[in-house]
Image (cartoon, grey):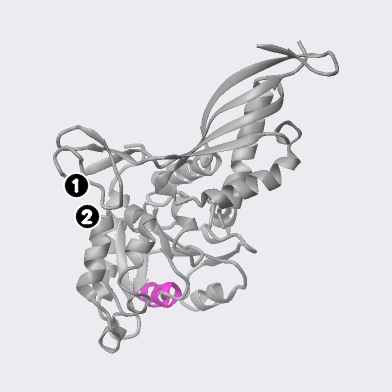
Amino acid sequence: MHEMSLAVEILRIADEAAAEAGAGRVLRVGVGVGWLLQVEEQSLAFHLRAMRQDYPRLREAVFDLAEEAVRVRCRACGEETQQADWGFSCGSCGCRDVAVVTGDRLEVQDMEVLTDDV
Amino acid sequence: MCETEGTGHLHQHQHVAVHRHAMEANDEIASRLRRSFAARGVFVLNLISAPGSGKTTLLEHTLAQLAPLRVSVLVGDVETERDAERLRSCGVPVSQIVTAGTCHLEAEMVANHLPEVDQRELDLLIVENVGNLVCPTAYDLGEDAKVALVSTTEGEDKPLKYPAIFHRAQVALVTKSDLAPYLDFDREALFANIHTVHPGLDVLEVSAKTGEGLDRWLAWIRAQVEAKRAVPSGV
């Protein structure tokens, strides 16, 4: 259910970024969905579509959701490797003392916009 | 690239890099809370579990034994003041956060309700989150430690089905340990599953009903409070 709260934040950020860029219309918003956050993508997409009507700049925007894999850095050997499942460990040396470097963010990455009349 | 619209107006088609985290507004408030707690040496716990795992009952028994620590509690529920009424009888300041549908607590709710329970010197703030193993996980409340609770009646595979909270927790509590003999409860499997998701995580077994294991849980809290107090703010 927290997908609705997340959708509100994504719309707020996209609308703010569009205003800063002087864009009257947003065509596409790229969103990176970190695997670690356990976000239900279909639910998030539904809420984005339903609520974009409240933001005039975003009414036609397509939201491109792309899952972002978890990558960890090993505290022993320093290697950075991608993880396929829970129980993270270094893909190089097998050490379990690792720090997550990607996959824990829900990020508005980029947008295609039409700026106002020039 | 320029294109002409039907109106004859020219529009510039642009690519805009954004790279902003959807949790940024929550995280900013959480960071502010964390700095303020650090400056005052207040240790903050965020208790997270499925509904019915025994958070409130465990808290009743915990609060009764934490004196002389100065404790306040914020408790989140979708509806009613029932949990706050139960916890107030323990003699500590309690504020109920009624989320009216929202499935988790956010840092702003903590910031808004904090003044109700934070009118004196404080050693420990306990936040009892809304009963939910998924949604509260991603929301930083400015806490020092997330505590994941799982009861013996819930099944050994809970940590595998809801891994994110066990991954982020600083300690796991297995509650209702007194019921274990009456259930097909596989203790070794639960521990193995917790450690699959979070290698080396401290797991404490407790029973609010019999008091079994409460001493270790209370000792853990007291040690954390002591450590927080000893660290000067800003270090």
x and y percentages locating residue B178 in the rendered image: 29, 84
x and y percentages locating residue A113 in the rendered image: 66, 23
Instruction: Answer with left or right where residue B116 lies relative to residue B34.
Output: right
Answer few, some or many: residues within 10 Å of disc 1's Cα (few below 14, many 20 plus, some between 14 and 19): some
Q: Quadrant of the N terminus of chain B?
A: top right
Residue A112 sits above or below residue B11 on the image: below
**Badge 2 and badge 1 in a common chain:** no
The disc labelled 1 sits on which kind of residue?
A: Arg
Residue drawn where x is 24% and y is 77% of the image: B186
The disc labelled 2 sits on which kind of residue?
A: Pro
Residue B55 drawn in magenta: yes
Residue annotated with mark 1: A96
In front here: A110 or B124?
A110
Residue drawn where x is 79% and y is 17% of the image: B5
Answer few, some or many: residues within 10 Å of disc 2's Cα (few below 14, many 20 plus, some between 14 and 19): some
Question: Residue B67: in sight, yes or no?
Answer: no
Q: Quadrant of the C terminus of chain B?
A: top left
Residue annotated with mark 2: B199
Subunit of mark 2? B
Q: Secondary structure at mark 1?
A: loop
Marks 2 & 1, CB-CB < 8 Å contact: yes
In front here: B233 or B10?
B10
Q: Main secondary structure of the magenta part?
A: helix
Residue B112 sits above or below residue B131 on the image: above
Question: Residue B191: in sight, yes or no?
Answer: yes
Subunit of mark 1? A
Stretch of the chain drawn in magenta: B54-65
Q: CA distance from mark 2 to mark 1?
A: 7 Å
